[in-house]
Amino acid sequence: MLKKYFSKFSNDIGIDLGTTNTLVTLRNAGIVINEPSVVAINNKTNKIVAIGTEAKNMMGRTPEHITIVRPIIDGVISDYEVTEEFLSYLISKANNLNKKFLRPRVVIGIPIGVTDVEIRAVEDAANAAGAREVYILEEAAAAAIGMGLPIESPSGSMVVDIGGGTTDIAITSLSGIVKRKNLKIAGDKMNQDIISFIRNQYKVLIGEKTAEEIKIEIGSALPDAHSVVQRTMSIKGRDLVSGLPKEIDINETDIREAMTPSLSQIVEAVKETLETAPPEILGDILTDGIILTGGGSLIRNVDKLFEENLKVVAHISAGPLTDVVVGTEMVLADLNRYSELVIKDSKEIIPIE
């Protein structure tokens, strides 16, 4: 009764605080915000001039007095004040969609392996940004909940969340994480791999935005089994020899070669996690397979790369870009049910139930 009473006066907000993109869900309204985790700052006035999509569109085009900042790097806060402003923007925007009297309760998804100090920084930033109560949840656990895996059962499930800044690997069972591993190799690292490869092989310099477009357009983990036609793409950059603009054609073999070292490290990390898992849970994973989520799971044939190297079936989640934020919303709907997976708020706030 008390929970229903308070819900009339307060919003419940779930946030997937990602290195590349941040998603926000409002309870009973679904996903209401999907913005790049980017902020543009005027160095002369020290004020924020753009946030999210507007700031991302400025990347590579700003004058000297404007700096583009990523408040979250490798899944953790890189700039506390900017992160506070970013969270304040997100929470205010979500709250304004359905204004309530009390400040909102907030669940925030963070990568596996974040330190207590980093957890506290996220929590403090959310409190300063207007949250009434803050709960922290590991992203892999949130993704497992969001995709509907039976995390409360004794059967083991394996989730590999390949995000922008980090890859989270988790084996869940009985409402807990049995094995976990965090790798600071993910989508952003692959973009840097592509930039380096094109610079070294073609003597052309491209930006992060172009690298991301290349990865999405022609990136792949393995060649297509039944296709002999290579995907190609024309890109523009700066010729490092002449210093002038130059357009070149690249193909998927080039990009696959560029990304292979990072993808191999992710596969190896999953293998190491499997090698230390209890035998009974290995049997469950062999039966049900590995579930891939996050933007990196959308790289062409990445599931086949896992299957080829680990001899275990790999499934790509139905909603790899939204699993985490959907999971945060489900946790807010029933905090008691998922209390074992929630990293407790340092102020030990008792959930309204």
Image (spheres, rainbow, N blue to C red):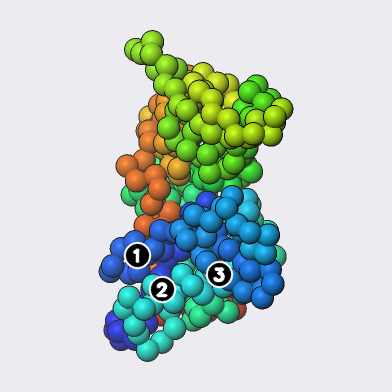
Residue visible at 49% across and 49% down? Answer: 140
Left of 199 or right of it: where is 33?
A: left
Residue visible at 58% across and 79% down? Answer: 128
| Residue bearing the label numbered 2 | 93
- Residue 343 spot, x, y in % from top left: 55, 64
Q: Secondary structure at mark 2?
A: helix
Amino acid type, callout 2: Lys
Q: Secondary structure at mark 3?
A: strand
Between the residue at mark 3 and the residue at mark 1, the CA separation in whole angstroms equals: 22 Å
Amino acid type, callout 3: Val
Q: Are marks 3 and 2 in contact (CB under 8 Å)?
A: no
Left of 63 or right of it: where is 349?
A: left
Mark 2 vs 1, N-terminal side: 1
Amino acid type, callout 1: Val
Mark 3 vs 1, N-terminal side: 1
* Image: 325 above or below 301: below
Q: Is residue 140 visible?
A: yes
Q: Nearer the viewer, mark 3 or mark 2?
A: 3
Q: Are marks 2 and 1 in contact (CB under 8 Å)?
A: yes
| Residue bearing the label numbered 3 | 49
| Residue bearing the label numbered 1 | 32
- Residue 66 spot, x, y in % from top left: 64, 63
Q: Which label was assigned to residue 270? A: none
Q: Secondary structure at mark 1?
A: strand
Q: Residue furthest top?
A: 228
Residue visible at 30% across and 84% down? Answer: 8
